[in-house]
Every structure is written in C-alpha cells, then in structure tokens.
Amino acid sequence: MKKILLTAALLAVSTASAQKTDLEFWTISLAPLFNDEMNRLVAAFQKENPTVNLKWVDVPASAIEQKLLAAVAAGRPPAAVNLASDMVVKLNEQGALEALTLSDAQRKLYFPNTLSTFTIDSKVVGLPWYWAPKVVAYNTDIFKKAGLDPNNPPKTIQTLIAAAKQIKDKTGMYGFMPNINATNMLYLFQEAGLPIIKGGKAVFNSPEHIKLVQQYVDLYKKGYIPEDTMRRGFAGATELYSAGKLGMLITGPQFILRVANDNPAIYNVTKVAPYPINIAGNVIHTPLMGFSVPKGVKDKALATKLALFLTNDVNQLQFSKVTKTTFPSTVKASTDKFFKQGGANATDQGKLVSSTELKKAKDLTLVYPDASKLNKVFKDNIEAAMAGQKTVKAALDDIVKAWNASL
C-alpha cells in the first residue's frame, strides 16, 4: 500500500512539473554586471506564478534584432524582449511585435511621453523601462595634460569641440568620438532645433543642416576624431575611453559602470559634467529602453503579464538602485528620494547630473514608413560625405530626394 501511495505521489510531482510553462525574456548587454538583479526578477516572477519556469537570456546589442527575427520566424520567440526605441520602430515595421492591450490603470503607471514612444499607429507595441539622459564623462588627467581646467568642463557643443581639438593638438590623444554613425545625425539635428520632416516631407538639407554635418566632416578629415567613428560608434568610444585614450566620453551614465569594471584606474580620474545643451533645441535625445512582446508568443496574456511585471514601479525602482545611473519611466518610482542622493565617485556624479537633465530628456526617435530602407539611405550617404566621396550638400540632397519619393 505504501509503495502504491509513494508511486502516486511521485507521479503527481512529475505531472505538476511537466505542466509548468517555460518562458524566456531577453535583455540587451546587461550581463555580467546585473546578473544578480536579473536572477532576482526571475525568482520573484516564479514565486508569483508557480506554474512558470522563467529563463533570462542576455544578448549583445549588435545581435538582438537578427536573433529576434530568427526566433519569430522559427515560431519560438521569447515572451518578452528588451528593445531600444529605434529597434521597436524597425521590428514593428517588419511585423515582429504584438500590439498590447492595456487597461487605463496600467497605462497610467508610465509617464505619457514614455508610453507614447512605444505607441505606433495608436497601438502600444512596447512598455517603457529605463532611460538616462546623456552626460559627459571626462578624464581629468588628460584635461590637465592638454592645459584644460578639470573643474571647468565644456558647457556647449562649440566649447566641447574646441576642447577636443586642444586635447588632440597637445597630447596626440583623441578628445572625443561623437556618436554620429548610422542615423544618429538625425538626433543631433533635432537637438540643434532643426526639423526633420515638415508637412510629410523630409527637409533636412537646409544650409543649417549642411553646416552642422560639415562641422563633423571637417573634424574627421583633419584627424580630430577616430577613423573608425562611423563603423564602431558608441562601443568604440567606450573602449577607447576605458583604455585611457579618449579625453571625453558622451555616454548614458549607466555606462560609467563599464569603465569602473574595465579599468578602475581610469574610473578613478573620471569626473562627470552635463551634456552640453544646444540652446536652439533645448532637448537631449534620451533613448528609451522597453519590453515588447514578439509576434507568435503562445500565451500573449502571460507574456503581457511578464512585461508589466518587469516594468512595474517596484522593479523599475530596484533596477535603478542596482544600476545607480538609470531612471524609471513609471510615475511613482521616479519620485523616490534615491534619485536626489549625491556622492563623490563618477557613478554617483553621473546619476546626479543626469537627474538634473531629465526635464530636457526626450526620445527623438522618429516613426516613418520604410524606416529600414530610408535609414540605410541616410547612413550610406552620411558615410560617403564623411569619407569625402560626396559633398555634404549632395549627400543631404540625395537623402532627402530618396526619402520624399518614399514618404
């Protein structure tokens, strides 16, 4: 009799575990720094949902889009995927994301401007997670060697460029590596108060737009910015700064932790200044991270529940406390006293500086049809101008012509 009961009990246990639902969520480049926090989220969600086996997968930023498209095509997508706003625009256009159904109460959790970033054609295709206005991390040793005052960092784009030139002239090291690869020039236009699309037409080939691009072409030609700027972008800049070979790093404050991880000696001589605001635009492009539910998930309600859990008030605040440098996109979490605390190290400075810039933060990602195709036209032509294969005017004229044929 005992044997029968034991067999029945074992059978019940194996049946219960067999009935568990396997779920996955993907993040972008959070390992290994934030392993503990991600594992905490897994444990907390499983406790609330005992029938779920949740797995966390971290993916490099350069691979996430292709990996997701492949998973959707194979019919095995994750339940929730962390994407930046520009990725959401592209992947939504490719039919890879589900529209989410949210109650009024769920919508009100998030700041309206953050939720609207992930709302395309009146459909919510992502839930806002974290963001952080850019700051300028700078190497005080390099500043001293170049004859610059480490206690008086550049306050405008113009003085930042002048400081970068002085660093290169005096030390042979690069002053900065501007984030101008891919379509990033579109954000610089908007930060400078210059329009992109007016009345349904692309208008970014005016003399002001040409002048702005020409400034970077001249820096590139004269060797003031690294030759792999257009190829490696932000990743290249972070590596160069961590190696002690770059005077200033324009970065989200969360990446200052990477410098601490990669090279403590450089971190220890790093100070943080506000991102130089362009008065004309009075806005700082602040890319928003979110969680989307991919097309073809087996249980959309459960996937939505997971995305809401990952981005709720409690978990957004906890994530900010762990990163020490990112800010929540939920209303309640943003009011926590944690965000007003200062400190002497570069990480604490980054958080405090960034918090003062939040009122100017806006995700300037634009939504337009054929985004992938038009973005490639933009990238190819800007690269041609940087390489001296086209004049800036010809490059911008060609982009605008191609865009307007499509728009």
Image: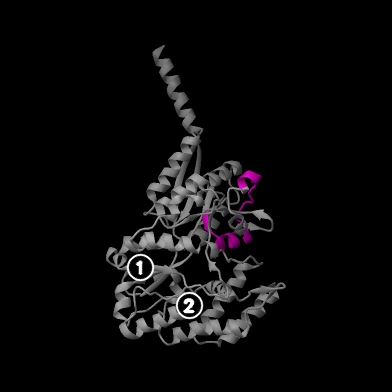
Q: Amino acid at mark 2?
A: Ile
Mark 1, secondary structure of its residue: strand
- Which stretch is magenta? 82-106
Q: Residue 94: within the magenta?
A: yes
Q: Amino acid at mark 1?
A: Lys
Closer to the camera in the image, 78 or 226: 226
Q: Disc 2 to disc 1, how far (Cα)?
A: 18 Å
Q: Residue at x 43, y 15 (%)?
A: 4
Image coordinates of residue 159 in percent, x first then y, are 44, 80
Query: To which residue does mark 1 refer?
Result: 271
Image coordinates of residue 46 in percent, x first then y, are 47, 38
Query: To which residue does mark 2 refer?
Result: 157
Closer to the camera in the image, 72 or 387: 387
The answer to whether 250 appears left or right of 81 in the picture is: left
Mark 1 neighbour density, 10 Å: few (under 14) some (14–19) many (20 or more): many
- Asked which quadrant contains residue 189, the reply is bottom right
Q: Residue 342: within the magenta?
A: no
Mark 2 or mark 1, earlier in chain? 2
Mark 2, secondary structure of its residue: helix
Q: Quadrant of the N terminus?
A: top left
Q: Which mark is residue 407?
A: none
Image coordinates of residue 292 in percent, x first then y, are 56, 52
